[in-house]
C-alpha cells in the first residue's frame, strides 16, 4: 500500500503541469487597446495632455497599463498625475487588477471587456470607487472617461481624454 502511494505521489510530482486554459488567447479580447496612445483632454475641468501605454506582460498572461497626465503647456515636462495598473484574467471572463497612483492611493480593479470597449471599476473602501471606460470611436480614436462615485451613489465625470495611437508595444 505504501509503495502504491509513493508511486502515485512520484508520478504526480514528475508529470509536467497542465495549463488550466490557454490564457494568452484572452489577450485577443483587448488587442484593439494595446499600444502607445497620446492625446488631450480635461482633468477636473482643466486642459491636459495624456499618455497611455497598454501592453501584454508575462508572455501574454496579463497586461500592464501606464498612465501619465501632464499640463497642457508643452514647455512643462512634469506630470500632474501618473499611475500604473497590472491586470490578469479572471476565471470565465473579464480581468482583475491592481492600480497604484502617484497620489499614493491604490485600488482593486474589476474589468469587463466588449469587442471595442472596456470598463474598469476601481475601488478602495477607505478612499473612493470609480469607473473608467475605454472605447474606440469610428475614427479609431480611443475615448477614455473617468467617473467617481459620489456619496449619493451616482457617478460624476472628472476626466476625459481623446487619444491617437502613436506606437505599438515594444
Image: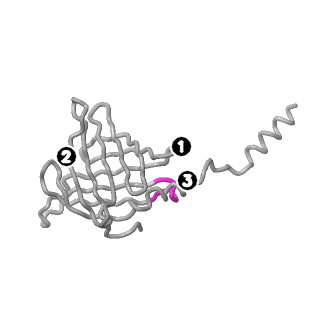
**Residue furthest front in the image:** 138
The residue at which mark 2 appears reads as 158
Of 6 and 17, which appears nearest the observer? 17
Of 160 and 170, which appears nearest the observer? 160
- Determine whether, in the image, residue 135 is placed left or right of residue 41: right
Indicate the position of residue 85 as horizontal and vertical percent values.
37, 50
Indicate the position of residue 86 as horizontal and vertical percent values.
41, 50
Color theme of the render: one colour
Indicate the position of residue 23 as horizontal and vertical percent values.
55, 53
Look at the image and give the residue range highlighted in magenta.
56-62
**Disc sitting over residue 23 in the figure:** 3
Q: Identify the residue at horizontal 49%, vertical 59% (top origin).
A: 28
**Alpha carbon of mark 3 to alpha carbon of mark 1: how far?**
10 Å
- Determine whether, in the image, residue 6 is placed left or right of residue 87: right
Is 134 above or below relative to 39?
Answer: above
Q: Identify the residue at horizontal 44%, vertical 55% (top origin).
A: 63
Tell me the crowding category of disc 3: few under 14, some 14 to 19, or many 20 or more residues within 10 angstroms, Cα based. Answer: some
**Alpha carbon of mark 3 to alpha carbon of mark 2: how far?**
34 Å
- Determine whether, in the image, residue 47 is placed left or right of residue 153: left
Q: Identify the residue at horizontal 42%, vertical 52% (top origin).
A: 114
Q: What element carries label 1?
A: loop
Is 4 above or below relative to 53?
Answer: above
Q: Is mark 2 on a helix, strand or loop?
A: strand
Q: Are marks 3 and 2 in contact (CB under 8 Å)?
A: no
The residue at which mark 1 appears reads as 91
| Residue 156 covered by magenta stretch | no
Quadrant (top left/top right/bottom left/bottom right) for the N terminus: top right
Sequence order check: which comes first, mark 3 or mark 1? 3
Sequence order check: which comes first, mark 1 or mark 2? 1
Quadrant (top left/top right/bottom left/bottom right) for the C terminus: bottom left
Q: Identify the residue at horizontal 26%, vertical 52% (top origin).
A: 82
Amino acid at each position: 500500500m505504501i509503495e502504491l502511494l509513493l508511486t502515485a505521489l512520484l508520478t504526480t510530482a514528475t508529470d509536467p503541469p497542465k495549463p488550466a486554459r490557454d490564457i494568452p488567447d484572452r489577450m485577443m479580447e483587448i488587442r484593439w487597446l494595446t499600444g502607445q496612445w497620446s492625446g488631450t483632454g480635461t482633468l477636473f475641468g482643466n486642459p491636459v495632455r495624456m499618455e497611455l501605454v497598454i501592453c501584454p506582460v508575462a508572455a501574454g498572461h496579463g497586461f500592464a497599463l501606464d498612465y501619465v497626465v501632464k499640463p497642457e503647456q508643452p514647455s512643462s515636462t512634469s506630470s500632474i498625475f501618473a499611475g500604473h495598473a497590472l491586470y490578469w484574467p479572471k476565471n470565465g471572463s473579464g480581468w482583475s487588477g491592481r492600480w497604484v497612483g502617484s497620489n499614493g492611493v491604490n485600488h482593486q480593479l474589476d474589468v469587463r471587456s466588449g469587442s471595442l470597449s472596456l470598463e474598469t471599476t476601481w475601488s478602495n473602501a477607505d478612499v473612493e470607487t470609480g469607473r473608467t471606460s475605454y472605447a474606440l470611436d469610428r475614427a479609431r480614436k480611443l475615448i477614455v472617461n473617468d467617473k467617481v462615485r459620489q456619496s449619493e451613489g451616482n457617478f460624476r465625470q472628472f476626466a476625459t481624454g481623446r487619444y491617437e495611437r502613436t506606437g505599438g508595444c515594444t
